[in-house]
Amino acid sequence: MTLSQWFIFFLSIQVIHFIGTWKLYVAAGRKSWEAAIPVYNAIVLMKIINKPSWWTLLLFIPVINLIVFPAVWVETLSSFGKNATKDKVIGIATFGLYIAYINYSQQLNYIADKSSQPINKTTDTISSLLFAIVVATFVHTYFIQPFTIPTSSLEKSLLVGDFLFVSKVNYGARTPMTTVALPMVHDTIPLTKKKSYLSWPQLPYFRIPGFQTVERNDIVVFNWPVDTVYKFRDNSGLRADKPIDKKSNYVKRCVGIPGDQLEIKDGTVFVNEKELILPERARPQFSYKVALDGKTPIDFEYLLKDMDITDGAGFMDAEKRDTLFIAALTASNAERLKQIPGITGVEKIISKEIEPGIFPHINKWNRDNFGPIYIPQQGKTVPLNLKTLPFYKTIITDYEKNDLKVTGSEIRINGKIATSYTFQQDYYWMMGDNRHNSEDSRYWGYVPENHIVGKPTFIWMSYDSNAKGMKKIRWERLFTTVSGEGEPQSYFKFFLMALVAYFIGEYFWKKKKSV
């Protein structure tokens, strides 16, 4: 929906509210016109139903308002003596229109002090639960969101089985674009594989200012730009256009920011013609071939486990068994292998042939030798022709919603001949540290700024699903930070100490109070 459509929708709601409630306002000792003034009418209604005025703000926060509106309808009915379960069910089922029926068909008896009414334990429990959901949804949407690492694309920085807290405030929280959705779930209702949202209506993109911008080498959570999967974890082949904030969440390392020129040479990333120096905690991995002399016995099971090889390994020729393939190996472990008796050579596998699936799908590059390309920056203008169009076509049509038509060598945008294009937002280049096992920008291109979700800051739980029997907790990773210098340090013991101190303090405080 456009801003003008939202404005008309908002005014329509105000008219319906006035028609359906003005007599209730009068019965509560207010003026009828107070039901007609937008926003002010909600503030007055909160006074009528004995709720704090700040509840008015909740009515305008997407997703949260889906919880608050039914609560307001129920409280309004209760304030005029309609406490029966039947009344509450009808009130919610009719989306509040039952209040209009009461407004015109019933003798209105306003109960100013609802505390004098008998307490309904069920209603009280539901109210408490709804309030808890509202608070949790607010925190989840605007402050911190839990996230699980599902793939090994960022090994060894983030491991499969890491549970993270993702900060929304660092880069600034997005206000929800999808207005009708279940709270605290992403695109699918748990256990059902059904969509958790309605694609219409949509709010325009808006981001609350953060205290930092996305920088090179930041690990970033974002919505996968080319996500068209019909359902989460669906293999049916059906495709769908998802709202931006309901596209699948990905986590990668940002290696290029708006305005950068990026190139990959033999697996090494160069930004603005300089090699990108990764932080100390980053350990990029590549596939390797390990040549063996075929005579010296080597305990590969122990060796691979000791080097924490997680992406698998095996002989390239099962009969000769003279060359071992390791899918993902760090440079330090490659050097270690060179020192082991019986190993005659360790060679990084670098792609030389053209790979058809590489962005921008012009059959020119591969995953290890790529570019140079320009990473679009908001407000910057680039020449547009048949040679440059493949780089920016998706930006023009999908991300910035323009009509694009190409006839021969003529390019038209929104009906006008275009020889250049000016970008409406910033874009980023995201890659995994596990360079030969990461579906990233090398395959599907730029990440728009409006797809940025947040910054992983803290690992609160981690387990190894490869352990025999029960899943093994990685105690050394609990309560560690995602970024920082040196090896990650666990603060779990300090958390336990603080927890013990709290319970001891609470015990003595209660004991002193009882005396």
Image: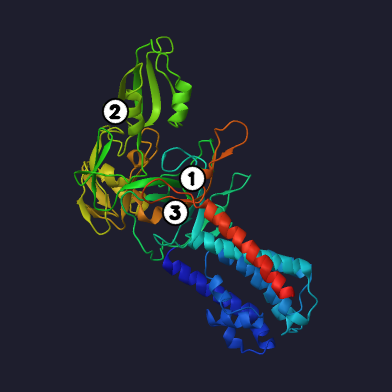
Image spot of residue 489 (x, y percent): 45, 49
| Disc 2 from disc 3: Cα separation | 33 Å
Residue tagged 1: 240
Residue tagged 3: 457
At horizontal 35% and vertical 12% (from top left) the residue drawn is 293
For the residue labelled by badge 1, is the local secondary structure a helix, a strand or a loop?
loop
Judging depth in this view, the residue of 391 and 368 nearest the camera is: 368
Q: Is residue 168 left or right of residue 514?
A: left
Q: Can residue 360 be seen from the camera position used here?
A: yes
The amino acid pointed to by label 3 is Thr
Q: Give yes or no for contact between labels 3 and 1 (Cβ–Cβ under 8 Å).
A: no
Q: Quadrant of residue 317?
A: top left
| Disc 3 from disc 1: Cα separation | 32 Å
- Quarter in which the C terminus is drawn: bottom right
Foreground mark, 3 or 1, reads 3
The amino acid pointed to by label 2 is Ile
In this rendering, is residue 501 above or below 81? above
Instruction: Tell me which label, 2 or 1, sits earlier in the chain.
Output: 1
For the residue labelled by badge 3, is the local secondary structure a helix, a strand or a loop?
strand
